[in-house]
Image (cartoon, helix red, strand yellow):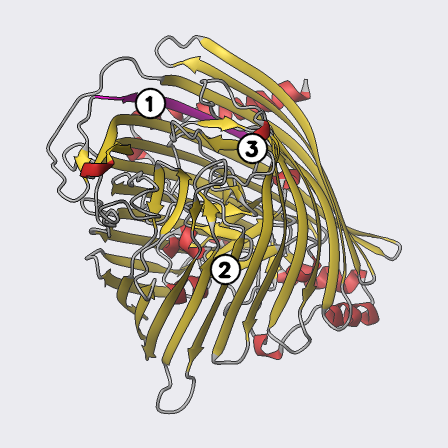
């Protein structure tokens, strides 16, 4: 009865708004950066009262010694939903859904703050992740449609994307696009996270925290342009609204940007338009209610699917130009309209009991039309084969997460208990069609355009897929002296249905239920060293169809992780090292023949080591460094020849480092410069591991100057203009990486 009631509620939550949104998405107020998430920390006033009542002075002093507090942070109070001090975050909510120090979280966590995003001038979410341990960002190179990344060797952008602690998964082409100007922080939680979030990638999640209405006024405007002619204008304004005392305190924020212009590939624009308003109402010190909305539109074209010979290695004529467009500008298009609307509610019921409810409804409408490269038609004449392609995907997703946090003591043990019930509803209209042999081949050096050839025949996908998921979870964070033990458990109930779009007839359905668990232990030595160990399982009921148009089987995963975190006393920074053994079952992999389709292999294992260092080393110098090495291989497969082989487009060695220095005094005060190096290891272009994609070293540069309220900057990605292939999904599907991109910007705040 409980399962049926919860799933029915999830169904209603996603389906009620569907009709109006499916017909008129532009009327929705929402959009991408909408929050509804996990964890809000108790008010400072309530927390202080609670701590004084629960802990004697001596134990409080001991706790303070165990939590390094660099003196440079005096005056800055960090919350998991707020700004990061320089490059160094001390707290995060992604690993526990509570306000927890990173040094007390027995799992690998990385946090990228808005200041780092600004310094590196990241234009996309995957660019934000380029210097993060364990993450291969920009898997498909210069593609402007989506954000792509791997965590610990596994594709995670489809089921591992979260906004304010609530999932934004996608299947087929109904993907989501989040905007970097509206990101306060980006948190990467590595390892299985299903115990708190339900269905998600067993390798980890990327949780974007939206910018929230500020208590102090924000007035900011920026404009810029890059060497390809792509220009933008953005703004960020907000602050308190004058209200009478009886109405409480009201705060607002509006973030927006208009971006328009070409990219390194001919006829491929990158046009983005978004706006994200939000309002917070605080009627008293124990209550907070925030409404967040966003709306966005993207206009671009699909990337090129190019062959291995002619990109990675020379063909007889050399290599295909990186500016070559394989489609047809009169036919090709990729558009995304996206809206989101949600809220975050928190109420401190008593000093030690807090209730939170977060909700969001999201809608996305994607149209993808074009001619797609399909290996050489005649390599001797440099003629590339193509096929005709069309996809129309419309999806709705609704999330509701209820949390009850209770803080209490049992003897010498301090508990932070979290109980939650969350509901998810998802529905996608998936229409896809293609024709082989109807589109003429194209010469890569002398392309001819203007062929508008209609698609014929029935679509190969014409389905409506609905999934309803209900989950309950319980977590206890137990502190005894310097030990912190985290125990978590969750059970999910899922119903998935595939129906024909034209008749509504049910074609396939499945019910699933699974328990996920996690146990982690960390010990904080007084000198700032904190070793930890954890074990977690995951469960992910994938939404989508395989190459045979059958419902995907749910993924499962298990991971053991051992690591150490170091935050030296008096030093504003930390170092982490972790080793892990991660297994992922029923992995969705790209079909080597039809690269738009996927199948599920048996099992893939990832074993590796990650090192990361983040520091505000001095007032002037900020540093980031990361090292990732793992062995990724098929540990089980229906094809015995593939056992022991590494999946395609997956490098096994990543090294990066970034530094930024800003003069604070003297005649150069306000001037700063930064730069970084990124090493991306070699990968494979075929499942047999015979076609290697070489490793590459890339450099980035930043120059900036601040004077009074003005800031000017010059950012360069791929400083040496290295021509390289980012990855190959197959021998016929290789993707060039970003060429040198120089962005000049100027901003003003008041």
Residue drawn at (40%, 10%), measured in percent from left and top? 504
User: What residue range appears in magenta?
Assistant: 424-437
Distance between mark 3 and mark 2 Cα atoms = 37 Å
* Mark with earlier residue (2, 1): 2
- Which circle, 3 or 2, is nearer the viewer? 3
Q: Which residue is mark 1?
A: 432
User: Is 546 in front, or is 292?
Assistant: 546
Question: Given this view, does label 2 or label 1 mark the residue nearer the observer?
Answer: 1
Residue toward you, 136 or 734: 734
Which badge, 3 or 1, comes first in the chain's sequence? 1
Dominant SS in magenta: strand
Q: Which residue is mark 3?
A: 642
Residue at image mark 2:
112
Q: Kindly state the secondary structure of the residue where label 3 is placed.
A: helix
Q: Are marks 3 and 2 in contact (CB under 8 Å)?
A: no
Secondary element under disc 2, as helix, strand or loop, is strand
Q: How packed is label 2: few (under 14 Cα within 10 Å), some, or many (20 or more)?
A: many
Compute the Cα span from label 3 to label 1: 30 Å
Residue in front for this viewpoint, 208 or 403: 208
């Amino acid at each position: 009865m409980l399962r049926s009631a919860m799933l029915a509620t999830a169904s209603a939550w996603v389906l009620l708004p569907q009709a109006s949104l499916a017909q008129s998405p532009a009327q929705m107020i929402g959009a991408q950066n909408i929050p509804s998430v996990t964890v809000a920390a108790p008010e400072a006033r309530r927390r202080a009262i609670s701590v004084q009542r629960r802990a004697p002075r001596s134990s409080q002093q001991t706790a303070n010694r165990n939590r390094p507090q660099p003196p440079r942070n005096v005056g800055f109070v960090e919350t998991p939903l707020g700004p990061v001090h320089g490059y160094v975050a001390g707290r995060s909510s992604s690993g526990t859904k509570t306000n927890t120090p990173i040094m007390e979280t027995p799992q690998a966590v990385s946090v990228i703050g808005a200041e780092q995003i600004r310094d590196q001038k990241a234009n996309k979410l995957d660019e934000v992740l380029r210097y993060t341990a364990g993450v291969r960002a920009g898997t498909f190179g210069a593609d402007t449609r989506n954000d792509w990344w791997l965590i610990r060797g596994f594709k995670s952008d489809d089921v591992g994307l979260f906004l304010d602690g609530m999932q934004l998964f996608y299947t087929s082409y109904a993907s989501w696009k989040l905007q970097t100007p509206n990101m306060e922080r980006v948190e990467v939680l590595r390892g299985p996270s299903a115990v708190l979030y339900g269905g998600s990638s067993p390798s980890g999640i990327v949780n974007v925290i939206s910018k929230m209405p500020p208590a102090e006024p924000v007035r900011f405007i920026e404009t810029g342009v890059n060497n390809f002619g792509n220009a933008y204008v953005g703004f960020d304004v907000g602050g308190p609204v004058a209200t009478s005392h009886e109405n409480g305190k009201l705060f607002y924020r509006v973030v927006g940007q208009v971006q328009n212009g070409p990219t390194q590939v001919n006829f491929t624009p990158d046009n983005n338009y978004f706006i994200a308003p939000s309002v917070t109402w605080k009627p008293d010190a124990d209550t907070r209610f925030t409404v967040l909305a966003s709306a966005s539109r993207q206009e671009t074209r699909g990337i090129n699917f190019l062959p291995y010979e002619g990109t990675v290695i020379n063909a007889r004529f050399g290599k295909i130009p990186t500016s070559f467009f394989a489609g047809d500008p009169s036919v090709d298009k990729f558009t995304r309209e996206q809206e989101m609307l949600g809220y975050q509610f928190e109420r401190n019921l008593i000093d030690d009991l807090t209730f939170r409810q977060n909700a969001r409804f999201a809608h996305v409408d994607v149209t993808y039309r074009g001619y797609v490269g399909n290996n050489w038609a005649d390599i001797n004449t440099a003629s590339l084969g193509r096929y005709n392609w069309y996809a129309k995907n419309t999806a709705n997703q609704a999330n509701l997460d209820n949390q009850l946090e209770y803080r209490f003591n049992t003897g010498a043990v301090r508990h932070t208990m979290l109980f939650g019930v969350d509901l998810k509803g998802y529905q996608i209209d998936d229409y896809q069609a293609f024709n082989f042999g109807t589109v003429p081949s194209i010469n890569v050096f002398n392309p001819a355009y203007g062929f508008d050839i209609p698609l014929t025949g029935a679509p190969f996908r014409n389905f409506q897929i609905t999934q309803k998921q209900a989950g309950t979870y319980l977590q206890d964070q137990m502190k005894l002296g310097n030990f912190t033990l985290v125990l978590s458990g969750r059970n999910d109930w899922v119903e998935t249905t595939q129906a024909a779009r034209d008749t509504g007839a049910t074609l396939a359905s499945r019910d699933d239920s699974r328990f996920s668990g996690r146990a982690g232990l960390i010990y904080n030595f007084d000198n700032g060293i904190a070793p930890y160990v954890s074990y977690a399982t995951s469960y992910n009921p994938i939404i989508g169809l395989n190459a045979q148009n059958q419902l995907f089987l749910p993924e499962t995963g298990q991971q053991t992780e051992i690591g150490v975190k170091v935050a030296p006393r008096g030093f504003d920074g930390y170092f982490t090292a972790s080793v892990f053994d991660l297994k992922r079952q029923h992995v969705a992999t790209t079909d080597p023949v039809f690269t738009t389709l996927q199948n599920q292999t048996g099992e893939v294992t990832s074993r590796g080591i990650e090192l990361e260092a983040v520091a505000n080393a001095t007032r002037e110098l900020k540093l980031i460094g990361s090292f990732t090495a793992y062995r990724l291989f098929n540990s089980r497969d229906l094809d015995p020849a593939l056992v022991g082989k590494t999946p395609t487009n997956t490098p096994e060695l990543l090294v990066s480092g970034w530094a930024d220095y800003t003069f604070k005094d003297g005649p150069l005060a306000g001037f700063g410069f930064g730069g970084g190096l990124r090493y991306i290891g070699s990968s494979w272009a075929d499942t047999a591991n015979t076609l290697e994609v070489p490793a590459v070293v890339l450099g980035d540069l930043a120059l900036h100057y601040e004077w009074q309220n003005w800031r000017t900057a010059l950012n360069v990605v791929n400083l040496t203009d290295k021509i390289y292939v980012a990855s190959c999904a197959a021998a016929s599907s290789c993707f060039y990486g970003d060429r040198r991109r120089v962005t000049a910007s100027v901003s003003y705040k008041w």
